[in-house]
Amino acid sequence: MTVRTDWTREQIAALFDLPFDELVYQAATVHRAHHAVGEIQLCTLLSIKTGGCPEDCGYCSQSVKADSGVEATKLMDVQAVLQKAAQAADAGSRRFCMGAAWRNPKDRDMPAIVEIVKGVRDMGMETCMTLGMLTPKQAGMLAEAGLDYYNHNIDTSPERYNEIITTRTMEDRLETLDHVRKAGINVCSGGIVGMGETRADRVGFVHTLATLEQHPESVPVNALVPVKGTVLGDMLADTPLAKIDDIEFVRTIAVARITMPMSMVRLSAGRESMSEATQALCFMAGANSIFTGDKLLTAANAGDDKDAAMLAKLGLVPMEAEEPLRACKALEAAE
Ligand code: SAM
Ligand code: DTB
Ligand code: SF4
């Protein structure tokens, strides 16, 4: 199977339109060809700088525009971050994702960030950071520190982007992804479904990622966590039917899996409002990672015990191998 970056919107829409059984079957077939079957990568999130963000992302509890009650903090101490990472490693997590509520990091923040990356890597965990927009120089510093992945989501379709965020553009987002790619860091980019978008927006969202010159090695698919006091959280509270349909969510995972066969597709935020059956369908459709622990960045998450019980019930095991690195190598070989 070759990795295609020439998908058309029509082809992606046709995948979404398949009978559900057929779509999941095709996605599972692609998944089995390229990924460790029955293995789920456990990841832990930590907000290393919370709240007070000048951006106006309509979904986010950490924007200054949101009235969500999230308290703004300064960047955590390096040692405090490393302690949290060690706890996550002890709990069986293999990937540590750190998020900062910044539009972009300031150059004066970089020495601490570099120290954090090195420290977490020394623990043998895969590292991911999401700090907002980067300059090429900052991306280079992160690469040199050994950062494995940089997360920077495109979030939705190009058409819908400026209805969700007005303080930056999709082009700004793609520019940072380009700096990350050129610095040699693995790209992590996905988005959120359930923001009141149309099927066509979901097609446009997957199309944007699947037609990048090189697919992101990691594609997080979040279901909107509706937070009171945010534009989208409040909108959803007023129109409960706007919540993403479970089957449509699984379809999005499946289409991401088929169009980006080598990428890690991550069942990210929003599992709190999903049944185990829906999550099981996501795994069948090719999702190969979850966030464990009882907190995402600011929102609640299932918790280790509940997830361990679900994985045991489904006969899934935590991933030990360096699947993403394997995926990258396979991708290089296919080029
Ligand atoms: N400030 C950085 C940025 O925006 O790139 C990093 C942190 S930001 C919180 C990381 C990602 O989390 C966002 O791009 C968005 O896709 C996701 N996210 C934020 N709030 C969410 C919510 N309420 N529900 C689902 N996903 C959310
Ligand atoms: C991503 O796509 N999802 C994660 C991670 N990248 C940084 C963040 C989810 C945030 C959920 C809402 C919250 O906790 O505030
Ligand atoms: Fe800031 Fe990121 Fe939240 Fe947007 S998603 S408001 S950039 S923390």
Image (cartoon, rainbow, N blue to C red):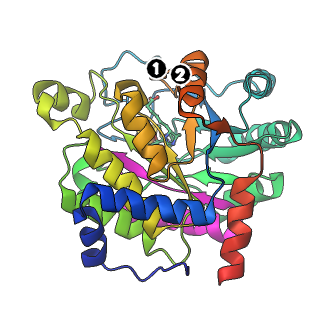
- The reply to whether residue 150 is visible in this rendering is yes
Q: Position of residue 271 (x, y in %)?
A: 42, 30
Q: Position of residue 134 (x, y in %)?
A: 59, 56
Q: Which mark is residue 300?
A: 1
Q: Amino acid at mark 1?
A: Ala
Q: Amino acid at mark 2?
A: Lys
Between the residue at mark 1 and the residue at mark 2, the CA separation in whole angstroms equals 5 Å
Is 106 placed left or right of 79 in the picture? Answer: left
Does the segment drawn in magenta span residue 286?
A: no
> In the displayed structure, would residue 206 be above or below residue 275?
below
Describe the element under mark 1 as helix, strand or loop: loop
Closest to the observer, 309 or 243? 309
Q: Quadrant of ligand 3?
A: top left
> In the displayed structure, would residue 156 be above or below residue 317?
below
Could you tell me if the residues under marks 1 and 2 are in contact, i.e. CB atoms within 8 Å? Answer: yes
Residue at 34 percent of width and 41 percent of height: 57
Q: Which residues are magenta?
A: 167-193
Closest to the observer, 36 or 65? 36
Question: Does label 2 point to a residue whose CB lies under 8 Å from ligand 2?
Answer: yes
Describe the element under mark 2 as helix, strand or loop: loop
> In the displayed structure, would residue 228 be above or below residue 193?
above
Does the segment drawn in magenta span residue 174?
A: yes
> In the displayed structure, would residue 229 be above or below residue 22?
above
- The reply to whether residue 158 is visible in this rendering is no
Residue at 56 percent of width and 24 percent of height: 307
Residue wearing tag 2? 295
Q: Which mark is residue 203?
A: none
Is 320 placed left or right of 216 in the picture? Answer: right
Quadrant where the C terminus is found in the figure = bottom right
Quadrant where the N terminus is found in the figure = bottom right
Q: Position of residue 268 (x, y in %)?
A: 48, 39
